[in-house]
């Protein structure tokens, strides 16, 4: 009864709320951040957001109500930042079992939509795995357009935005201009293509021997139902220039499908720190959020640790770092991403404001030496 009275009072003020229950990892982080006494137990948090306009619907059984996307006048005046429900799918793929991997991905996307997710993100190479030396790899990559079209149908059917990891695209097969592209797409909940990004920073000789990157093409930001979004892929995380180009164009969310393994570093590096790649991923994701006042959605591949899979898929923001994070196993995170955290990050650090100054002293598009 007390809860009902509280929510009714908030509704009268043009606000809506949502209870989120904590898992032990989030509890430990919250307890440390706010110095909560050890004998207290944190049960839930109450997330505030704008209340959507309520309309009446006529049915055979009488009247019922629904919420529409039209904001109330109070919500408009208060300029409340949206809260997006994000599904990060850490999927284990069977190498070159494209149809089976696609069916698994669709099942996971359906589960995300059933939980109310507005966006589902899959890992890099999720359809084919990475097996460029296999003679069946290129033929498998020739069907990329078929699966892209299928994902568009899935997005529309389940009313969910999708970044289907990456699709390896075979172009001009058999000709001198034949090439393989590693591409990420943003598909809207209407089935439209909002944007495409071809991986720019290829991982050493492992990828450069087989893939063609986007080289000096500028990074682009896409208008999506979740606002301005940038796409990067895996090793792009190592390059702060990529993030700068995106946020200078207004990106608030950056989505990174990945296929990042524990054995990516040298043997000498692993002697210094056997789990150096975990440190690399966690440190850079949190650091990039702080230094760019953005949110990052990182979807890595799942698999057995014995095969060097490390997972660590997460949704990361300034101040808090990972809102939720997986280990190496296959799984899915469904996370409420409050964009007011991003706004507060910029309010605190004013990174974007500095970048917009006419007298800003760095150039982020490198020029060739003359």
Image: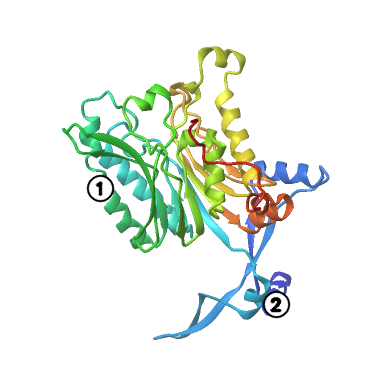
Q: Is residue 234 left or right of residue 180?
A: right
- For marks 2 and 1 on the same chain, the one whose residue lies earlier in the sequence: 2
Q: Residue at x 36, y 42 (%)?
A: 183
Element at label 1? helix
In this rendering, is residue 112 above or below 304?
below
Can you say which quadrant of the picture contains the N terminus? bottom right
**Residue 208 visible from this viewpoint:** yes
Residue named by callout 2: 13
In the rendered image, residue 292, in percent from the top left (x then y), is placed at 62, 46
Q: Quadrant of residue 343?
A: bottom right
- Pick the front one: 237 or 114: 237
Number of residues whose C-alpha sits closer than 10 Å to that of mark 1, classed few (under 14), some (14–19) or many (20 or more): some
Element at label 2? loop
In the rendered image, residue 248, in percent from the top left (x then y), is placed at 56, 51
- Pick the front one: 219 or 26: 219
Residue named by callout 1: 145
Q: Residue at x 61, y 28 (%)?
A: 279
Select label 2 or label 1 by which is in front. 1
- Pick the front one: 126 or 115: 126
């Amino acid at each position: 009864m007390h809860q009902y009275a509280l929510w009714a009072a908030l509704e009268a003020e043009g606000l809506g709320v949502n209870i989120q229950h904590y898992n032990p990892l989030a509890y430990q982080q919250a307890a440390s951040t706010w110095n909560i006494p050890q004998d207290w137990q944190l049960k839930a948090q109450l997330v505030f957001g704008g209340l959507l306009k309520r309309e009446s619907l006529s049915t055979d059984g009488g009247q019922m109500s629904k919420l529409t996307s039209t904001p109330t006048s109070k919500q408009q005046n208060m300029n409340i930042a949206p809260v997006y429900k994000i599904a990060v799918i850490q999927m284990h793929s069977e190498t070159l079992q494209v149809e089976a991997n696609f069916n698994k991905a669709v099942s996971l996307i359906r589960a995300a939509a059933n939980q109310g997710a507005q966006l589902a993100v899959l890992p890099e190479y999720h359809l084919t795995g990475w097996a460029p030396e296999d003679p069946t790899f290129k033929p498998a990559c020739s069907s990329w357009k078929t699966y892209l079209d299928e994902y568009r149908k899935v997005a529309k059917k389940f009313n969910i935005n999708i970044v289907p990891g990456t699709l390896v695209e075979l172009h001009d097969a058999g000709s001198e201009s034949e090439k393989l592209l590693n591409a990420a797409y943003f598909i809207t909940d209407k089935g439209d293509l909002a944007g495409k990004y071809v991986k720019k920073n290829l991982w050493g000789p492992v990828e450069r021997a087989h893939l063609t990157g986007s080289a000096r093409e500028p990074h682009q930001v896409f208008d999506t139902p979740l606002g301005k979004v940038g796409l990067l892929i895996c090793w792009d995380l190592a390059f702060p220039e990529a993030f700068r180009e995106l946020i200078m164009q207004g990106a608030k969310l950056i989505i990174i499908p990945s296929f990042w393994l524990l054995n990516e570093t040298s043997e000498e590096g692993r002697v210094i720190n056997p789990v150096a790649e975990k440190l690399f991923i966690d440190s850079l994701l949190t650091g990039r959020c702080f230094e760019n006042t953005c949110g990052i959605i990182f979807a890595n591949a799942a698999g057995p640790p014995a095969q060097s899979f490390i997972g660590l898929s997460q949704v990361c923001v300034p101040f808090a770092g990972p809102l939720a994070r997986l280990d190496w196993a296959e799984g899915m995170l469904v996370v409420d991403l409050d964009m007011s955290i991003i706004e507060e990050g910029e309010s605190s650090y004013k990174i974007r404001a500095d970048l917009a100054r006419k007298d800003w002293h760095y150039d982020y598009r490198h020029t060739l030496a003359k």
